[in-house]
Amino acid sequence: MVEGKKSINFLKAMLYLLPALVLMAIFTFYPLIDTFIISFKEQYDNVTGAYSSIGFENYQRIFSAGNQFVLCLCNTMVIVFASVPVSILLSLLIAVALNSIKPLQRFFQTVFFLPYVTNTIAIGMVFSIVFESHQGLANTIITSLGGSNVNWLGGNIQGVTLGNNLFNPDNALFTPQWFTSMIVLMVYIIWNSLPFKILILLSALQSIDKQYYQAAQIDGTSKFRIFSRITVPLLSPQIFYLLITSFIGAFKEYTSVVAIFGEGAQSVGHRHNMATVVWYIYDKIGSSDATEMGLAAAGAVVLFAIIMFFTAINGYVGKKRVHY
Amino acid sequence: MLLAIIIITAIIIIALLISKLIVTKKEQAFENARRCPENKYYVENADEIIRREKTLKTIRYIVCYTFLVLLAIFMLVPFYWMIVTALKTEAEIELVKPTLFPKVITWSNFRYILDAKYQMSLTTSGKLQFDLFRLMYNTLVVGVFSTIGTLVTTVMAAFAFSRIKFPGREIIFTIFLATMMIPGEMMIIPNYIVVVKYLHGENTYWAMIVPFLISVYYIYLLRQNFRQIPDELYYAAKVDGTSNLKYLFKIMIPIAMPTLITISILKLMGSWNAYVWPMMITSRDDMRLISNGLRQSFTDSEGRSHQGRQMAAAAAVLAPLLIVFVCLRKYIMRGVSRSGIKG
């Protein structure tokens, strides 16, 4: 520790922190506040900087019926609540299985880590070809098992849509086409998120004291009981950490959607039916109508609020359930 | 076909493991029997127990390995399909019943991606569809400079947070950490306005570098590492009359080298994957980074056709990452796994 006079130390520290503080001020703190302000500026024009008044109009507009944002929010929620539990459960099973084997453990470990060091866009394009409706690998496997071709990504075939759905003004959500496209997206997101989780859980498993297991073995405890009473509680800090980070990550899902469905995020016509909240934000920033920047800001604030809300819930539950 | 080979190999491996297991168990049983030959009852019973345990354990191993092998196949299939598709001819890709292994291996797709002249001769628009080396060059420029800059800011900040005692240290660090929870989308709108409107950063390298010169997560990682260095080392250096800066460069940085290497690799990989920000601030094709170039080269006009070329391009983008992974696996995996263990 650098000892000495407090004021001199403060100056010294500021000198070392200067680059970090300046960059954070310009690219983190100022934008954070400015986004809030922009979201309340009505008819904000980002070219001239002019706006008509301060109010909630942007929020009203994004939540009004027929706005793309509601659809994006639905998609994001589906992604979050389907992909996070599945991937955590799967990675837990894989980590436990990996931990219980001796030969080939390192080989499997490397294989399971491989998706981490890939390019999201490149592999997304691979997935869109694996799930291609005519000659894709997925359909080949399905047809060879006796099924019929599935129109995963919309492709060239006209989208099959089921009558009216109350949820979606433009009839893009919860249709058969939406479901099949969502399955592909889910598979990709899970494929992509497994390596990180497996690695974290495995390294935590390997650091668990063997004595717990030996004690359980002496008592003749069943394998399932060992898993649920020793392994999971001892892993709970890591599971909890993964839960928080993957919740946040799933709420921000964007690149994987663009990678599979292109920048329009659509698998049917021109409906943007696979769009997520972050997609909406970027779409509005890039919009030719300069006044839509306010909508993007409002969308970002809503996303921020949702993430904070879920992180708070996680924190609350974590306090009760996690054993440190 | 290849799937069948993989499955058969897996079965053989499992069978070998099981047989080895059985042999060792049998030896143990004999060992037990040899140790207490007078107690016949015990030996028989032990045999019985061991046999039961053995079958249970074998079943458990079979389930375990089958599960792992299946999931490993799931993990590897995209890579396999990418390479196989890139090696197929256009006609073979268009077959209604696709082949699992190319009948005729063609390198023309890879040549199209890697050889600019060849690509030019095949395009009608008069410009390259996918200029791999230009994209790689852009990405490397952005990646290398942002890595160097990040290392500088990270080392300085981590040093201040771990070695200098100053009022407000914990508060500032907590504020830094809190920003990690905020989604980047909260910052991107004003950043975009500032960089493009006020600083005229459109289509420039610095606009892709400067906003990402700071990473709270890396500061946190390095601070943890610096804190593990005992204070005594610092006092010893002070007694010898070493300055703070010299101490930082001669002692702390060498000790924290593995962490710095990890940070560099992760940062470089990050710019290889950067998509959103570069997309927003570049409008010219020759300024794009590799992910954007890849996405934008294979969408509009040609759609899903030319799958072979798409996959060859994807493979070319992935290859450097995989090479880095193979060479520096230790650093990457350690850096990533460290993030899960909270200090």
Image: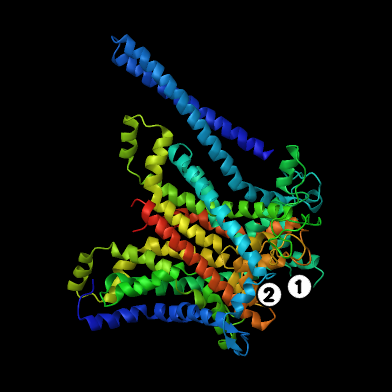
Task: Give me the residue at 27% from left, 74% from top.
Answer: B164
- Secondary-structure class at tag 2: helix
Circle 1 packing at 10 Å, graded few (<14), some (14-19), many (20+), is: few
Left or right: B281 in relation to B338: right
Labels 1 & 2 near each other (Cβ < 8 A): yes
Check residue B285 in the rendering and tell me which mark sits there, or answer none: 2
Check residue B127 in the rendering and tell me which mark sits there, or answer none: 1
Where is residue B69, by image quadrant?
Answer: top right
The residue nearer to you, when weighing A62 against B280, is A62
Relative image position of residue A72 (x, y in whole percent):
63, 65
Q: How far apart in space, not on screen, are marks 1 and 2 (Cα)?
A: 10 Å
Q: Amino acid type of disc 1?
A: Lys
The residue nearer to you, when weighing B233 against A189, is A189
The residue nearer to you, when weighing B8 against A201, is A201
Count of marks overlaid on the render: 2
Relative image position of residue B231 (x, y in whole percent):
22, 66
Where is residue A74, by image quadrant?
Answer: bottom right
Q: Amino acid type of disc 2?
A: Asp
